[in-house]
Structure formats: C-alpha cells, structure tokens
Image (tube, rainbow, N blue to C red):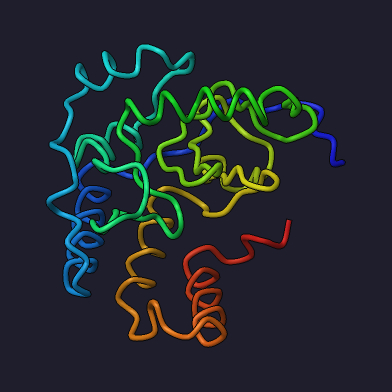
C-alpha cells in the first residue's frame, strides 16, 4: 500500500461561484435535452447560513465549492435510481446535506475505520461526500489530500479503493457536460467506454497516471 507521510492542508484557488453555478445549469439542461427530467427532483438552493446549519454534523470546514454547489441546488431528492431520473455526476447521485450525513457515517464506518490518512493520502474524516451511490462516494477533500498534489482541490472517489478522479469540481462538471451531451451517452458499453475515457482525459489530463 502506498504511504503518504503527510497530508497538506487544502490550498489553491476555488472556481468562482458564478462560473461553477453556470456550469451546473448547463449540465442540468444537458440532462433535460436527453429526456432525463432531473429538474423536478432537484431541491431548492441553500444559502450559506442554511448550508452551515444543515451540515453542522460535518467536522471539517466547508469549502467554497460546496457553497457554490448547494447554492445552486440543494441536492437530488432521491437516494437511488428509480422511475425518476437522478442528477448524476457520472455514477454518483448529487446528495442533499441530509443524505450526505448518512453517507458520511457509512463511509467512516467502513473506509474510515481501516484507512488512515498516511496510507490513503486523504483525511476522510474531513472529506465531504457530496455525491454517492450504492456504497461509493465522491468527496471534496476539505482537509486536504496527497493523492494528487498538483491539483489540491481534486475530487476523490471512495469506492473499491481511494483515488483522485477529477482535477477539480469545475473539471468534473465540464466532463459530465460533455458525457451527457455526447450522442453515444447511454450507448453500447464498448463504444461508450472509449469515448468516456477520451472526454475524461480531455478535461483531466493524466488523471489516472498517478
């Protein structure tokens, strides 16, 4: 197992709220254009005070990206895929703060028990699970991470391991927009796998090279 002697604190400049929220709106419209009626299942925006209150359970300091995200919409109403189309970030559903609390507890009872920051390269206890599905999480490393030092604000996936999946919240959303907008989205698995990785690397060059 890789060893990370120290976890640097979160650094780098966050994406401005206006730009991040504009990209989220573009992603919503991309889903709608494909016939996925996500809008009715997205909860209303939360201002900073509301988000802090709803996330009082979180031991870390909420990042600017989380205020941007929840200031756009308050999360996906549903926990899992059913007759309504969930708002996905690839394969994880955008969680409400209430769902995130439950998912955080689940993450800490599993990966949190057996993965130390020195071994995993991230402080899971101060990582916010803003998206989740079926025992997997996308987390923002509010307490810093050493998985991808070049991109300190990287989005980390916790599922069958722990790894940096996107260089930033912005690059994740841009990647998702290109995925959802592509003609092969939800197409044949082999064809889509190649296209998906090409778009992934376009917005996050070298993301899986570490």
The answer to whether residue 15 is left or right of residue 205 is left
Q: Position of residue 151 (x, y in %)?
A: 57, 47
Vertical position of residue 204 compared to residue 148: above or below: below
The answer to whether residue 114 is left or right of residue 149 is right
Q: Quadrant of the N terminus?
A: top right
Q: Position of residue 5 (x, y in %)?
A: 82, 28
**Residue 77 found in image quarter:** top left
Viewer-proximal residue, 124 or 209? 124
Q: Quadrant of the C terminus?
A: bottom right
Q: Position of residue 15 (x, y in %)?
A: 34, 44
Q: Residue at x 34, y 18 (%)?
A: 55
Count the labels in the image. Answer: 0
Viewer-proximal residue, 120 or 167? 120
Vertical position of residue 14 compared to residue 7: above or below: below
Q: Residue at x 20, y 16 (%)?
A: 49
Q: Position of residue 196 (x, y in %)?
A: 50, 75
Q: Residue at x 57, y 30 (%)?
A: 107
**Residue 102 found in image quarter:** top left
Q: Residue at x 29, y 54 (%)?
A: 86
Q: Residue furthest front?
A: 83
Vertical position of residue 64 compared to residue 148: above or below: above
């Amino acid at each position: 197992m890789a060893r990370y002697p120290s976890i640097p604190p979160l650094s780098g400049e966050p994406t401005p709220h206006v730009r991040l929220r504009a990209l989220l709106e573009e992603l919503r419209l991309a889903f709608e254009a494909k016939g996925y009626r996500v809008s009715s299942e997205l909860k209303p925006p939360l201002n900073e005070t509301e988000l802090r209150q709803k996330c009082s359970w979180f031991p870390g300091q909420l990042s600017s990206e989380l205020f941007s995200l929840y200031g756009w919409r308050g999360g996906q109403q549903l926990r899992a895929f059913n007759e309504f189309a969930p708002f996905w970030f690839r394969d994880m559903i955008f969680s409400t703060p209430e769902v995130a609390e439950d998912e955080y507890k689940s993450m800490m009872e599993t990966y949190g028990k057996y993965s130390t920051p020195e071994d995993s390269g991230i402080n899971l206890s101060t990582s916010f699970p803003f998206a989740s599905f079926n025992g997997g999480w996308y987390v923002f490393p509010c307490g810093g991470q050493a998985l991808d030092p070049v991109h300190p604000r990287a989005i980390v996936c916790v599922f069958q391991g722990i790894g940096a999946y996107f260089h930033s919240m912005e690059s994740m959303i841009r990647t998702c927009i290109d995925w959802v907008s592509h003609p092969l989205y939800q197409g044949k698995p082999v064809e889509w796998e190649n296209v998906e990785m090409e778009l992934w690397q376009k917005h996050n060059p070298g993301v899986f090279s570490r």
